[in-house]
Amino acid sequence: MSVWSDRKTHQLIAPEFKKMAQKSAPKPPLAKNLLWAFLVGGAICVLGQAVQNYIMTVWGLSAKQTAGPTSAVMVFLGAFFTGLGLYDELGKHAGAGSIIPITGFANSIVAPAMEFKREGYVFGIGAKMFVIAGPVIVYGTITAVVIGIIKYLMS
C-alpha cells in the first residue's frame, strides 16, 4: 500500500470517526456548571465584601482606603486554602467561579509552588511559582503603565 492511499483512507475515515466520537461523548451539564460557577464566584465576592465592611467598621476607613487591606486578606485566604488543598477541590466543582476573583490569582501562584516544593526552595518553589502567574503579573503591570500614561496625557 502506498503512502498516498494511506492518506486518502485516513481522510475518508477521520471525519466519520470524529462524528461517531462526538455522538458518544458525554455532554457536560452546562446549566449545572454555570450555576456552580455563579454561586461560588458570588460567594467569594460576598466574602470579600464582608471583609471590606469589617475593615471599614473596625478601622474606620473609607471604602477606597480599604481596597488594599481587603485584597491582601483575600489573597492570603486563597493562598492558605490552596496550601491546605481545599481551593483545588472547590475549583473542580466551581470551574471559572473559583478562578475569576482575586483568590484565583493567589491559587495560580501557590499551586505551582506546592507542586514543585520537593525540588527545593530555589529551583522548585522560587523558579516555578511564577510559571502561571508570571504572564498575569507582566500584562497587569503593562496595562497599569499604559492606563497611567493615558490618564497623565488626558489631565
Image (tube, rainbow, N blue to C red):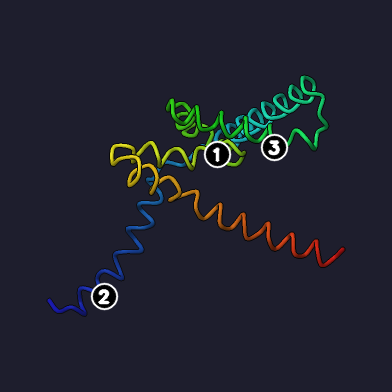
Quickly name the residue at label 1: 104
* Residue located 26% across and 69% down the image: 10
Choose top left, top right, bottom left or bottom right for residue 149.
bottom right
Residue 128: x %, y % from top left: 39, 47
The tag on residue 8 is: 2
Q: In the picture shown, does residue 80 fall above or below 145?
A: above
- Residue type, numbered disc 3: Gly
Mark 3 or mark 1: which comes first in sequence? Answer: 3
Most distant residue in the right direction: 155
- Residue type, numbered disc 1: Gly
- Residue type, numbered disc 2: Lys
Q: Nearer the viewer, mark 1 or mark 2?
A: 1
Q: Secondary structure at mark 1?
A: helix
Left or right: where 21 falls relative to 57: left
Q: Nearer the viewer, mark 3 or mark 1?
A: 3
* Residue located 80% across and 37% down the image: 64
The tag on residue 68 is: 3
